[in-house]
Image: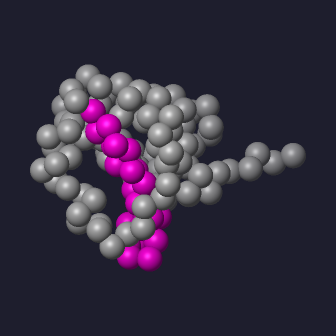
Amino acid sequence: MPIKRPTSRQKAKIIGYAALNKKAINPVILDLRPQSDIADYFVIASGNTDVQVRTIFMEIERVCREEGIKIFHSEGLGSGTWILLDMGDVLVHLFRQSERRYYDLEKLFQGCKYVGLPKL
């Protein structure tokens, strides 16, 4: 029996919950499909310190490995202020809280719908 791959939306939620597992601050999922060809979804989350941001990254990486979700590329791990993960149809932005406020991707993509991610 073939393994069923998660949809883009399911991937984004899996990643969002992985971020919450490490106490990410205000993780959000934006549905980019109507407005962008970059990806289907953005997952945006932040941490208070570089260490917390890297810890969130490592949890997402672990969960993706378990779920069979391929991470095609990642960058920014060295600094821990803004880490980007590219899964093709889902892009993950992990920020230190101050950088998240500065770059304000939610405002840049304000016309996109939020996908619900209940707090744990």
* Residue 65 forms part of the magenta stretch: no
Determine whether 47 is above or below 93 in the image: above
Q: Residue furthest front?
A: 119
Q: What secondary structure prevails in the magenta region? A: strand
Residue sitting at x 16%, y 43%: 99
| Number of disc labels | 0
Image quarter of residue 51: top left
* Residue 79 horizontal/vertical position (percent): 19, 31
Q: Residue at x 29, y 67 (%)?
A: 109
Q: Does the magenta portion include 29?
A: yes
* Residue 93 relative to residue 62: left or right: left
Seen as rendered, the residue at the extreme bottom is 34
**How are the residues colored?**
one colour
Q: Position of residue 3 (x, y in %)?
A: 76, 46
Outermost residue toward the right in this view? 1
Question: Residue 2: x, y in percent?
Answer: 81, 48
> What percent of the width, then of the height, locates residue 30?
41, 60
Give the vertical position of 49 relative to 64 (above or below).
above
- Residue numbers of the magenta segment: 25-47
Q: Residue at x 42, y 54 (%)?
A: 29
The quadrant holding residue 66 is: top right
Left or right of 83 on screen, residue 81:
left
Query: In the displayed structure, would residue 91 be above or below residue 53?
Result: below
The answer to whether residue 114 is seen in the rendering is: yes
Q: 83 above or below 79?
A: below
**Relative depth, front residue between 48 and 68:** 48
Q: Residue at x 34, y 43 (%)?
A: 26
Who is closer to the viewer here, 118 or 35? 118
Q: Is residue 60 visible in this depiction of the protein?
A: no
